[in-house]
Amino acid sequence: MSDIIHLLPDNVANQIAAGEVIQRPASCLKELVENSLDAGAKHIRVIVRDAGRTLLQVVDDGKGMSSTDARMAFERHATSKIRQSSDLFQLRTMGFRGEALASICAVAHVDMQTRREEDEIGTRVEIAGSEVISQEMVQCPVGTNIRVKNLFYNVPARRKFLKTDQTELRNLIAEYQRIVLVNPQVQFTFVSNDEIISELPTCTQKQRIEAVFGHSSKPYTGQLVDIATETELVRISGFIGKPESAGKNGQQYMFVNGRYMRHPYFHKALMTAYSGMLLPDHSPSYFLYFEIDPEAIDVNIHPTKTEIKFADEQAIFQILLAASKEALGKFNVTPSLDFTTESHLDIPNQIPNIATISAPRIQLDPQYNPFRTQVSHRAEKGWEKLYEIPQRAELQVEEASFDVSLITENTPLIQWDNHYICALTSIGLLLVHQHRAHVSVLYKVLLEQLASQQATAQPLLFPEVVELTNSDLTTLEQLLPELQSIGFGLEQFSPSAYSICSVPALLGQKNASEAILQVIHSVQDTEQSAKQQWHEMIALSLAEQMAIPQGKLLTDIEMRDLVERWLHTYTSRHLPNGQTIVTLLTHEEIQKRF
Ligand code: ADP
Ligand code: MG
């Protein structure tokens, strides 16, 4: 019997490796720009066509390569950045695995020109599917200019897996932002389909954040406070959002030694510092830059290097927590939260130990609050709860459904805590979350309007102008037909702004720009690209904004009207995002308690 094990040819091995490193145009952009940074570039230009599908080009003015290195660079495990395994713990470069270029050239047509300062003439290498097609000498500027064409031309499954151009462009921009935010000392340009969509001069860290997220009309960094701490173990600097500026989609970035990272545990430290200061479902923006001895972290856990292991995670957790509390306290940002507005806050037992925080006042109406003494139960709800996502499986176990006959005109209704409607029904005590019940009603109306394209638009007396970041602009353009069909009148006002001349009548007096931005961000948060799923996201996001606020005092007629309308459209005890609308205490459950 002949042997059956053999070594894979390089092009096959490279293609397999590419599966991990190069998943989409955005991962290709990350690898190429990181190489330019490692080469000491001062100006990096990214040029894409068709969201990187047909062309992704990175031009830098870094140190370039010799003609031998230009060829070697495409070999697997070819790197100039480490020599031995111990170097892995002394990393000062973004790359070290030596597999990015090998992976890219296995799944695309690559054309690279490069020259070092000391060489008179440069080198051009052309490679496709890991095969060198040509190598020649060329006249070219110092630095490297690499063109990646027809990505995944030989991997149809990967090509099909790519999302629409709009989504891939959004991914490219997101990746670009992660890099530019931590490299303000480098000038960047981003060109998409011959249009410059970002031009960033060298500047400070804060100016870079402003340049990426700010609008001319509203300084973005005004919403941030500085954070800085230095210990033997780690240096942390950056900016964290004032609690009142927190929204549903905070910009959250953490970097370590110049590298973007995800770190749920450190995220938790920060959220602990904010506990009690945020509205439910709101999260703050933050930009945190960690500097640490490379020996104390392990970057080599995952090929994309965004998961990073820290040797002293618990100590850093404490340092970050203390620094964040100090930052929030020092700038006296906490009292500026208005606890007396209609919005309801969860007040935890432990108000953070900062002398500057004044005790929050909660507005309670004694007439409508027969269970007042139980208010402290709410306090047990820690910050973890805010991040709890109900399991889908749990949600599917629906008990008895409800119908309109459940509430008659004699059913007593009581509002509790300006938050819930308690109905004493024949099947037990029904507790309805007033805001969510209204969201559910509006959600269904909006879905129908989106499907039938029959919404009532209300013209604005003074059109509003909404300024958008690049990625928001891309999403908005994608959503235009839907937004128009639901009553938003939108016209391009400038390259980065739209004017709003009408809004859905249901939106009432709500801020139109804010409404549009929230829709954009909620769609961006999901990776859905199917139209129906967009409809659902748009309807839910708008319904949440249109619904009566949490904490609003309701009259008996209003309560009755809301509960009846909700029962008329009843399909589930939960909103599509999993939030519970209603809970029922049956007679048996009540009896058990006695
Ligand atoms: P790694 O970055 O992990 O070393 P890559 O496959 O990304 O692996 O690159 C291989 C090598 O090619 C790098 O180590 C570097 O020496 C060289 N190289 C790649 N891109 C550039 C560039 N833009 N400028 C100079 N040298 C580069
Ligand atoms: Mg690299």
Image (cartoon, rainbow, N blue to C red):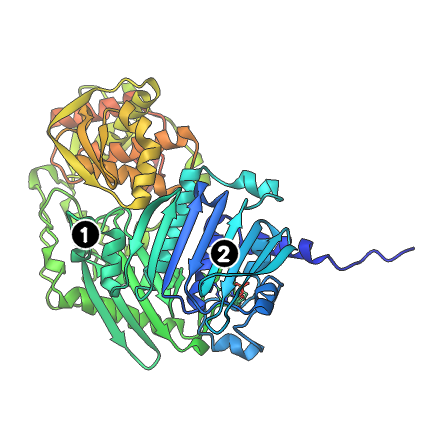
Q: Which mark, residue 363?
A: none
Quadrant placement of the C terminus:
top left
Q: Mark 2 highlights which residue?
A: 146
Mark 2 is surrounded, within 10 Å at the Cα level, by few (under 14), some (14 to 19) or many (20 or more) other residues, namely many
| Towards the viewer: 178 or 130 | 130
Amino acid beneath label 1: Ser
| Towards the viewer: 205 or 531 | 205
Could you tell whether 533 is left or right of 205 in the image?
Answer: right
Which percent across, then down, holds residue 103? 58, 56
Amino acid beneath label 2: Ile
Q: Which mark, residue 245?
A: 1
Which percent across, then down, holds residue 6? 79, 58
Could you tell whether 374 is left or right of 530 in the image?
Answer: left
SS at badge 1: helix
Which percent across, then down, holds residue 320? 29, 69
| Residue 233, quarter of the rendered image | bottom left
| Residue 318, quarter of the rendered image | bottom left
Q: Is mark 1 within 8 Å of ligand 2?
A: no
Which percent across, then down, holds residue 305? 48, 62
SS at badge 2: strand
Mark 1 is surrounded, within 10 Å at the Cα level, by few (under 14), some (14 to 19) or many (20 or more) other residues, namely some
Quadrant placement of the N terminus:
bottom right
Q: Are marks 1 and 2 in contact (CB under 8 Å)?
A: no
149 over 406 or under it: above or below:
below
Regarding residue 457, the answer to whether it shows in the image is: yes
Could you tell whether 531 is left or right of 343 in the image?
Answer: right
Q: Is mark 2 within 8 Å of ligand 1?
A: yes
| The furthest residue to the bottom | 232
